[in-house]
Amino acid sequence: MNIKKAVFPVAGFGTRFLPATKATPKEMLPIIDKPIIQYAVEEALEAGINEFIFVTHHAKRAIEDHFDENLDLKQRLKNDGKDDLLKLISKVGGKDSKFTFVRQDEPKGLGHAISCAQHLIEQNEYFAVILADDLIINEGKNVTSQLIDIVLEKDKQVIALEAVPSKDISKFGVISFNEQQDDVFHLSGIIEKPDPSEAPSDLAVVGRYIFNQSIFNSIDEKTPGKNGEIQITDAIEKQISNFVGIKFQGRRYDCGSKIGYLKANIELGLKHPEISDDLKNLLKEY
């Protein structure tokens, strides 16, 4: 079994970062010198994926432009002998990678966004869904690779889990489980954004999924769920016996929030060979 496709839902308006996101997609905001969305695509590429499907809308053209070839800039860098910079702007994945963009006409929830890519997924095919807002960094095998390993082992759909404090539990989908094997949980239920007193566990679903094409059969576009949106959580619940969750190895940064975005810049900046020493000195000043 080869998992070769990843879907990136990027049609949101990014209102928490206004006015910065009025004309710039939030996924194009940089972490140091690379936009958030590129970290997500490179994670998928490292996991063996070479077809990248973006669910977007008309105001997100900058994402498409970013992953397109800029021949004028490449020629200028080549003429100036700046081969190091030329490598940085080369097409992610090279000539074997494929980028496809589909439109979500209006924001109806994550379930609806994922369903917009249905026509690109083959019968019984497994595919990844990556939410770029959740930047997950790991020095070993990345989180998407970890999920793919579980799919290959269990032949089930997989979601990424993280233990979160009670005060934050109502921001997430939360799972219940009937069996645990190390960091793998066999799911018995899932609930979207529960009140802390009603949460079945402290294990929250974060932005990595491996679905089978059959998930589209369970996305009900006629019956919105919580907050009036078509939730992917509802579709997962309908197929819950065919899902496992994994507490992944790695550190997650919520780049959909201002403080999470700042943390990502600082912590990745401290590891960046070009600026780490200067940043350490700057932090000491504060």
Image: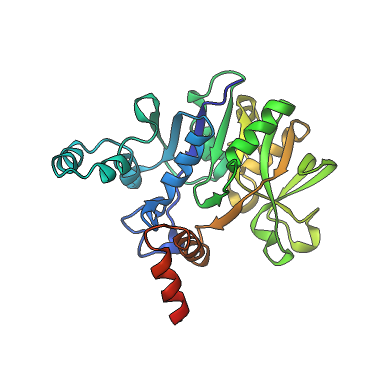
Location of residue 102 (image quadrant) = top left
Left or right, residue 83 beside residue 36: left
Q: Name the residue at the top extreme.
A: 123
Q: Position of residue 143 (x, y in %)?
A: 60, 42
The residue positioned 23% from the left and 38% from the top of the image is 70
Left or right, residue 16 beside residue 95: right
| 7 in relation to 107, above or below | above
Q: Name the residue at the right extreme.
A: 178
Residue 219 visible in the shown view: no
The residue positioned 52% from the left and 29% from the top of the image is 48
Identify which residue, 264 or 224, lies in the foreground.
264
Q: Position of residue 12 (x, y in %)?
A: 45, 50
| 284 in relation to 196, above or below | below
Residue 164 visible in the shown view: yes
Q: Position of residue 264 (x, y in %)?
A: 49, 60
Location of residue 251 (image quadrant) = bottom right
Identify which residue, 184 or 156, lies in the foreground.
184
The residue positioned 29% from the left and 36% from the top of the image is 68
| 224 in relation to 214, above or below | below
Q: Name the residue at the bottom extreme.
A: 285
Q: Quadrant of the N terminus?
A: top right
